[in-house]
Image: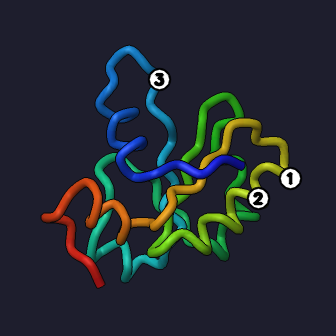
Amino acid sequence: MKQLHPAELSQWLADAGRSAPVVLDVREPWEVAIAQLPDSMSIPMNQIPGSLDKLPLDRPIVCLCHHGMRSMQVAYFLERNGYREVYNLTGGIDGWARAVDPNCPTY
């Protein structure tokens, strides 16, 4: 599992010449209602084991949560279950708001 800084994810998403990753938000629905990245997939952390069929094995996956701890655990879990290109968004949605999008709400 690799760590990905919010600015690096922003550049990746803006790069039309590069395949976009699956951005997997593992926060609870009430958290996603406060702030979310566009086009992200939301599956709460406790539902990941039963939702692996929803995640492609052939695309990079960037996991995110509030500050990066839950998403790190999910990223490790995905790697142990055959996902080869998995990233953890350091700082989570909070890091994204501080480094990339100051209009993104924090909580």
Measured as percent of width and height from the top left, residue 25 is found at 48, 61
Mark 1: secondary structure: helix
Describe residue 5's horizontal placement relative to residue 106 as left or right: right
Which residue is denoted by mark 2 in the rendering?
76
Measured as percent of width and height from the top left, residue 70 is found at 61, 73
Q: CA gap, disc 1 to disc 2?
A: 6 Å
Residue drawn 75% across the image and 53% down it:
78
For residue 66, above or below residue 57: below
Q: Quadrant of the rendered structure where residue 13 is? A: top left
**Please, what is the three-letter code of the amino acid marked with disc 2?**
Tyr
Residue drawn 54% across the image and 69% down it:
68
Q: Residue furthest left?
A: 103
**Please, what is the three-letter code of the amino acid marked with disc 1?**
Arg
Which residue is denoted by mark 1 in the rendering?
80
Mark 2: secondary structure: helix
Please tell me which of labels 2 and 3 falls first in the chain. 3
For residue 47, above or below residue 82: below
Circle count: 3
Residue drawn 65% across the image and 70% down it:
47
Which residue is denoted by mark 3 in the rendering?
19
Describe residue 21's horizontal placement relative to residue 86 as left or right: left
Q: Residue furthest top?
A: 17
Within 10 Å of the Cα at label 1, are there few (<14), some (14-19), or many (20+) other Cα atoms?
few
Pointers 1 and 2 in contact (CB under 8 A)?
yes
Mark 3: secondary structure: loop
Please tell me which of labels 1 and 3 falls first in the chain. 3
**Please, what is the three-letter code of the amino acid marked with disc 3?**
Ser
